[in-house]
Image: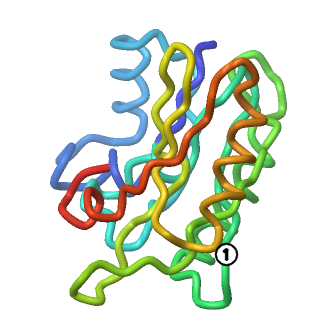
Amino acid sequence: EDTLLRTRQCLLNPNRNPGMTQQALEAGLGEALGAQRVLWLGDGLLNDHTDGHVDNVARFVAPGVVVCMRPSGADDPNREVLETLAQALAGMTDARGRRLKVVQIPSPGRVEGESGLVIPASYVNFYIANRAVVVPTYGTPYDTQAVEDLGRLFPGRRTVGIYAKPILANGGG
């Protein structure tokens, strides 16, 4: 409904849109997509090879309703980013003037690839199909809760978790 979520880390990254200002990007998004309001978030996940795509940290799930993650585990490498993001979203309004309703689900916590490097694991990077929602899972203790929490946001659709760590570790999502 005329509102977009974006991260500054991604769209204002010099390797993506060199020399473009936030205002110029907003105008372009408005023209191309009909957006009346762009809600800007800061950073994406640690080591995100997509320069912090917003779909790894926050998604609209209904008009005025955004889902994001809360940190999981004492060693969650994205704790500060996730806490900052949820706080920012809670203070935002959409193009229709509604204060956003923010729903938090657990994050996967610390997930490492074979090399031991933290990979940008996210339950928010789910896929919505006509009758299902497919949620990436990573073999963490938070997988089941995240799939169940997302299922409540999509009544009438089957919500399934699919093990996605190998896909993410090799550059997919």
Q: Amino acid at mark 1?
A: Ser
Q: Name the residue: 29% across, 60% down.
A: 168
- Residue 118, placed above or below residue 82: below
Q: For this view, does 20 lie left or right of residue 80?
A: left
Q: Which quadrant, please, contains the N terminus? A: top right
Q: Between 46 and 146, which is closer to the camera in this rendering?
A: 146
In this figure, what is the number of numbered marks?
A: 1
Residue denoted by label 1: 72
Mark 1 surroundings: few (<14), some (14-19) or many (≥20) residues within 10 A: some
Residue 117 is situated, as x and y percent measured from the top left of the image, at 29, 85
Looking at the picture, how far across and down is residue 107, in whole percent? 61, 65
Which residue is rendered at x = 50% and y = 26% of the image? 128
Q: Residue at x 25, y 67 (%)?
A: 169
Tell me what residue is drawn at x 59 percent, y 23 percent: 3
Is residue 158 shown above or below 39? above
Q: Eyeballing the image, is 30 above or below 20? A: above
Camera-side residue: 129 or 35?
Answer: 129
> What scheme was used to colour the molecule?
rainbow
List x then y, in percent, for residue 54. Answer: 46, 46
Residue in front for this viewpoint, 172 or 147: 147
> Which residue is at the front of the view, 147 or 66?
147
- Picture quarter containing residue 27? top left
Pinpoint residue 78: horizontal percent, then vertical percent.
54, 75
Q: Left or right: where does residue 123 sit relative to residue 48?
A: right
In the rendered structure, the answer to whether residue 160 lies left or right of residue 74 reads left
SS of the residue at dot 1?
A: loop
